[in-house]
Each structure stands twice: as structure tokens, then as C-alpha cells.
Image: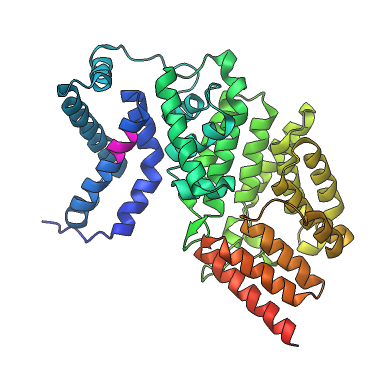
Amino acid sequence: MAVSRPVAVTEIESHFRSEYGRAVATLVRSFGDIDVAEEAVQEAFVVALDRWPEAGIPPNPAGWIITTARNRAIDHLRREASRENRHAEAVLLHLSHQPPEPVGPVTDDRLRLIFTCCHPALGRAAQVALTLRLLGGLSTPEIARAFLVPEATMAQRIVRAKAKIRAAGIPYRVPAEAKLPERLRAVLAVVYLIFNEGYSASSGDVLVREDLCAESIRLARLLAELMPDEPEVLGLLALLLLTQSRRAARTAADGSIVLLPDQDRRRWDRALIEEGHQLVRRCLRRGRPGPYQLQAAINAVHSDAATAAETDWDQILRLYDQLMSCTPTPVIALNRAVALAEVRGPAAALAAIEGLELGGYHLYHATRAELLQRLGRHDEAMDAYDAALAVTANGAERSFLQQRLSAAGEAARR
């Protein structure tokens, strides 16, 4: 008889993080209630923590999580219904008497839930935050960092969004095909932010969460199949593929960060780059540029260069100027400054970012520090690195910043 190997808590957590979005989406479709779905998946996690360390991981972890969560939800609703809880009674009635809901144009549960949460009755920030919570399985602190707002503010947004869905009776349905475009902007933002959290994790010891990167690319591909004539959908997919193409070169063997100019470009995924370039060309033929298409084009220029020295920074700066004209956000301005430094020098770039309201964003302080270093202002650079360290919780990022801080200190002492 086979003996189950011991299972670490971190391994169980990894399975739940990767399957959280699918489990919640499946249960929301079944029960029509966000809180019921989330609580049931959390209860399934507690059961797994109790059973899996000894019994081992089930052959089909995803199926186990969904089945266990569904059973827990039904048990919970039955208990509540026996206490004259009208909401629980209504949900149980829905489960027992309602015919299956027509699938409509969106057949993937997770993509269906994204469109559902992006209902126009909710504000844009609430739409994106709630969907990141449900589909990405991101914690409230992680979402708060993605939005550059305090954790308490984000927690209130998520609670209010759930309450509004329930109070307004917003149905858990995918809109008719004609109404899909009106929710598209929020849906694209959700998929993009899920990828960003995967590509540069806001917390933990590793830089990349591969499960989130893979899930966001999968969702982007589904969107491209669903809406092939929407250039911003193609632009988002191109952006994710071109960014993902560099993933293997972003970290050294010990997990430390390797900046773009120092990456071994032989490790870039040429198949993803070629697919991304084809999508960018399709976007260009449509002649309707948007933020994701422009960001994809910027990444395409980077991938064209065989070495960092061959990068066409003039073209990248022109693309950033165009991007700023349609999306004048502080983060875009910060990214533009990196190109500006290469074209007009670090002093011009530093002047361009002074005053940006990005005090809670570690890359703002890190970029300032790099520019100050290039200008020989090492003491100020050290202060900027300290500021960056104060607002990042990722272990790989902190280690990188500590190294840069030490280098700045050595330069200041010379």
C-alpha cells in the first residue's frame, strides 16, 4: 500500500492560490452569491489544512476544492435557512428550482465572473478591485498596493461593492453580446493588473507568481477569441506576451533581480515575441491606437534590439509621448522618464518626475535613486533607496534595493 508523503502548508497554500479564482467563479455561478462562494472556498482551505498534511494532496486538487467548497456552502445555507434567513432560503430555492442559465457568448466561468463584476452600476475602481479579489485571489493588501491606496481604503471599496451588488440585485449573468464592449475597459484593466501582480509580486519572497501570469494570459486569449475586432484586446494580449517573453531572464539562478539592460537576451522567448509582434502589426493596421496597443508597441521595440545598446530609445520616447496624450497617469509619466533619461539625460528625467504623486510606489523612489546616482548625487540617492525600501514588501525587490543602497553608500564614501 502506498504511503502518502508529508505535505507542507506552503504547498497547500500554493494549490489554493492557483485554484482560488476558478473555485470562486464556479461557486458564484452555482449559488449566485459572492460571500457564500468566498466563505465556502475559505472553509475548504481549512479542511485541506487539516486533512492534506497526512492524507496527501488529492489526485485532482481543483476538483476536490470545488466539491468540498460546494458541500460546505450547501451545509451553511441549510443551517441558515432553518433559522429563517430569507437570503439563504432564496439561494437554496434558486439551486433547486431554477433551470440552468444560458451560457451566452462567454463560456469560461472566470471570464464570465469578470464581466459580471464589471457591471456599470459599480464604479470603475470597485469593479477592478472586486474582480482582483475574486478572480486573482489577491489579498486586500496586495490589491491596495496595485492601486497605490491605503489598505483600509481598499477594504472599504470591496465591502461596498459586494453590498451594492446584493442591494441592487445585480444579476450574476453575462451581458448580451451587444453590451460586452461597454464593460471592456474595466475587464482589460482587471486582466492587466492580475498579470502585473504575477510578474512583479507585491509581497512574498519570489519576484514572479507564475500562476497569475499564466491565468491572465489565458484570459487575454479568451478575450481575443471573444472580441477579435477590438484592437485594445489584441493590444493587451500582445503586451502580456511580449512582457512574459522576458520572464526567464529577469532573475538570476539565486532568484535575484536582473534589470532589462543586463538581461541575457538569448533567454528571451522568441516564440512569444513573434506572436506579440504579429498582434502589434494587426493593431497597427486597424489605425485605432489605445493605451494597451501603445504599451505593446513599446515592448516590441525593446524586443527588436539584439543588445541593450541597440535599443531605439527615440522611438520609445515618441511612443510614450503618444501614450501620455491618451493616458496621462503618474505611472506612465514615471515610465516615460526612463526613456527620457536615455534620450536627453538623467537631469531632464529627474525634473520630469519631481512632484509626481507616487509616494507609496517603490519604483518611483527607486527610479529617482537611479537618476540621482547617475548625476553623482549619492547621498540623495541613498535617501531615495531608503524610501523605496519602506514601501515594498517583496523579498526579491528588497534584496535588490539593499544592494543598490550599499553601492550608493560606497560611491558616497569615495
- In the figure, is residue 306 to the left or right of 75? right
- In the figure, is residue 236 to the left or right of 84? right
**What is the total number of numbered labels drawn onto the structure image?**
0
- Way the structure is coloured: rainbow
Question: In percent of the image, x 79 and y 71: which residue is there?
Answer: 374
Question: In percent of the image, x 25 and y 42: which residue is there?
Answer: 44
Residue 293: x %, y % from top left:
72, 37
Main SS of residues in magenta:
helix
Question: In percent of the image, x 72 and y 43: which residue is there?
Answer: 329
**Quadrant where the C terminus lies?**
bottom right
Q: Nearer the viewer, residue 123 or 214?
A: 123
Q: Nearer the viewer, residue 313 or 368?
A: 368
Q: Which residues are magenta?
A: 37-41
State yes or no: residue 26 in magenta: no
**Quadrant where the N terminus lies?**
bottom left
Quadrant housing residue 124: top right
Residue 398: x %, y % from top left:
55, 67
Viewer can see residue 312: no
**Which residue is the extreme one toward the right?**
344
Question: In percent of the image, x 83 and y 50: which residue is there?
Answer: 317
Q: Is residue 329 above or below residue 162?
A: below
Residue 100: x %, y % from top left:
33, 15
**Which residue is the extreme one toward the left?**
1
Viewer can see residue 340: yes
- In the figure, is residue 340 to the left or right of 75? right
**Which residue is the extreme one toward the bottom?**
414
Quadrant housing residue 296: top right
